[in-house]
Each structure stands twice: as C-alpha cells, then as structure tokens.
C-alpha cells in the first residue's frame, strides 16, 4: 500500500508539473484500452515513462498498481492498459496510461536485439531488419515477415512467413506471428532461411558450402518455383536467380565427378532456363561462378 501511494503521488506531481507549465494545450480525450510495444525509460528526474518507437512525439506516463515497473527498464515489452488522459506540451503529446499487464518480449531479459539493413541469405537478395531473440530470429521486410525458430526435435529450424505492412509495429509482428502463414515448414530438419527477393522466398537444405538443396517459393502466387540440388554460389541479380544444378541427364562423367550445368530462374514468371551444356565437376573443385 505504501508503494502504491508513493507511485500515485509521484505521477500526480509529475502530471501537475506539466499541466502548470507554460504553452500547454489540452487536447481532446484519447481514452480507451490499448496494446503497446516499446520500452520503459527512466527520466533524469527519477520518473518512468514509456516510449513506443512507432509513435514519435508521444510520451506515455504509465501507472501500474500491481507491480513495480522498475524491473522492466530498457527491455522490449508488450504493455496493455487504458489511456486515461491526453495533453500536449512543447510539441509533444503526453498520455496518462493505467497499466494492466506487462509482458517481456523475450524469456531472457535484455537478450532481444534489433539490427537494420542486414544482408540475409543468398547474395543479391533484399536486406532485412532483424530482431534476434533467445531462441528465434525474426526477419522483417516491407511486405513479409519471416520467423525462424530452432526446431524442438531436430537440428534444423521451423520457418513461418506472414504478410505485413511497414505500418505494423515490428515488435508486435515478431512477437505475435499469428494467423494462416503464406509459407511454413513446421519441422525444418536441415532447412534454413536463405533470403527473400521480391515475392520469392529461398530455403536451403543441407550445408551451403557443399552440394545442397535449394528451394524457391513465390509467396504472392503460393507456388513453389524451384526444387534443385545445387553447388555453392547461387545468387540473385536483376530479378533472376543464377545457380549450378545437378545434371542427371549427363551420363558421360567419369568416376569421382558430378554432372552439373548452369541454370537461371526468372523470379517474375518462374521460368527455368539452361545456360549451356553440362560439365563434369570433380570433388574438391571450386564453384564455377
């Protein structure tokens, strides 16, 4: 009860100070229940505010009657509560928020990291914003989100892809990747996410440094466009995937070599084309790219 009284008193004094400050204009009430994703921050005055990165220029003044918010400072959290009041001061919007629940976005506090513009997967695929959790990685693109999780009963990964927009809160998308997926591998085995180019998702099976499987899926058309055994060195350039594939039709290769041929996949229409006659690749030779 003592802590509850102190918290209310601190919040009351802080809000009163803002309301008495010059150039304050009270706006229309913005009340109602809300779910937010962001961080609690400690102010220089010793108070606690909540900031949602999707709402620049907005400062939440939180009050939690059930637990101390100090244990959640500077970690990614989901906050559910109700907005009780809203006012403006010096170009910023302040909203008084009664907090009903706080949910950390990772089981291990402080382990969530976010990086922007990272190169993921095959060379030439799009860069992604990457949110890394304790046991999963979320790749965010303009129109898609890919969640890669360690499989429970294999050495591989579970893949799940959903559509999104740039207006969606990144933390909310990564934490609540729900709904019917556009593409999913429930138990990936040796499958790993290998990048995204436009609407085409790439998945590798096996070690990328050796002969391995490569799959391409057009998410917009919900159609698999490639399932091949390829050499290392596959890359995307100007809307086309270039790769070297196992060429079973070539029967004249000597023992100790593998028949291969260069191929291309047009990502727009899914057309596969041979780029020349086959050749025999000896074990230990480098990639022909």
Image: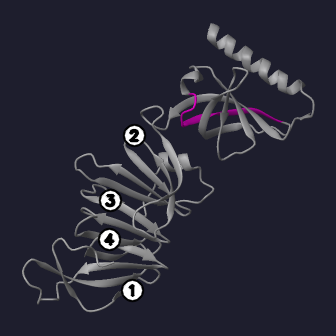
Q: Is residue 219 visible?
A: no
What segment carries the magenta color? Answer: 73-88
First along the sequence among labels 1 and 4? 4
- Report whether residue 133 is seen: yes
Name the foreground residue: 118 vs 2: 118
Q: Which residue is mark 4?
A: 215
Q: Quarter-wise, where is residue 229 in the image?
A: bottom left
Are the residues tagged 3 and 4 within 8 Å (C-beta)? Answer: no
Residue 91: image quadrant is: top right
Return the x and y of residue 218 as percentages of the image width and height: 42, 73
Return the disc, 3 or 2, that comes first in the chain's sequence. Answer: 2
Rate crowding at label 3 as few (under 14), some (14 to 19) or many (20 or more) other CA atoms within 10 Å: many
Circle 2 residue: 134
Q: Are marks 1 and 4 in contact (CB under 8 Å)?
A: no
Q: Which residue is mark 1?
A: 271
Q: From mark 2 to mark 1, how far is it between C-alphas?
A: 39 Å
Label 1 residue SS:
loop
Residue 209 position in % (x across, y down)? 26, 64
- Quadrant, the N terminus: top right
User: Sequence-wise, which precedes: disc 4 or disc 2?
Assistant: 2
């Amino acid at each position: 009860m003592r802590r509850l009284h102190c918290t209310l008193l601190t919040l009351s004094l802080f809000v009163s100070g803002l309301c008495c400050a010059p150039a304050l204009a009270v706006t229309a009430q913005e009340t109602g229940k809300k779910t937010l994703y962001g961080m609690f921050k400690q102010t220089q005055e010793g108070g606690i505010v909540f900031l949602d990165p999707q709402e620049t220029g907005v400062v939440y003044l939180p009050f939690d009657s059930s637990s101390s918010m100090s244990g959640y400072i500077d970690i990614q959290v989901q906050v559910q509560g109700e907005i009780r009041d809203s006012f403006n001061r010096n170009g910023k919007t302040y909203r008084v928020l009664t907090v009903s629940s706080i949910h950390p976005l990772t089981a291990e506090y402080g382990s969530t990291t976010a990086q922007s513009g990272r190169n993921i997967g095959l060379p030439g695929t799009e860069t992604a914003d990457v949110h890394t959790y304790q046991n999963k990685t979320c790749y965010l693109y303009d129109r898609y989100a890919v969640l890669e999780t360690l499989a429970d009963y294999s050495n591989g990964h579970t893949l799940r892809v959903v559509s999104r927009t740039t207006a969606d809160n990144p933390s909310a998308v990564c934490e609540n990747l729900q709904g019917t997926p556009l593409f999913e591998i429930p138990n990936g085995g040796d499958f790993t996410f290998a990048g995204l180019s436009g609407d085409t998702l790439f998945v590798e099976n096996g070690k990328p440094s050796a002969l391995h499987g490569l799959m391409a899926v057009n998410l917009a058309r919900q159609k698999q466009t490639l399932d091949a055994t390829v050499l290392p060195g596959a890359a995307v350039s100007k809307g086309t995937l270039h790769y070297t594939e196992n060429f079973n039709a070539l029967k004249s290769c000597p023992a100790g070599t593998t028949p291969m041929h260069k191929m291309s996949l047009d990502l727009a229409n899914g057309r596969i084309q041979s780029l020349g006659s086959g050749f025999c690749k000896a074990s230990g030779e480098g990639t022909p790219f």
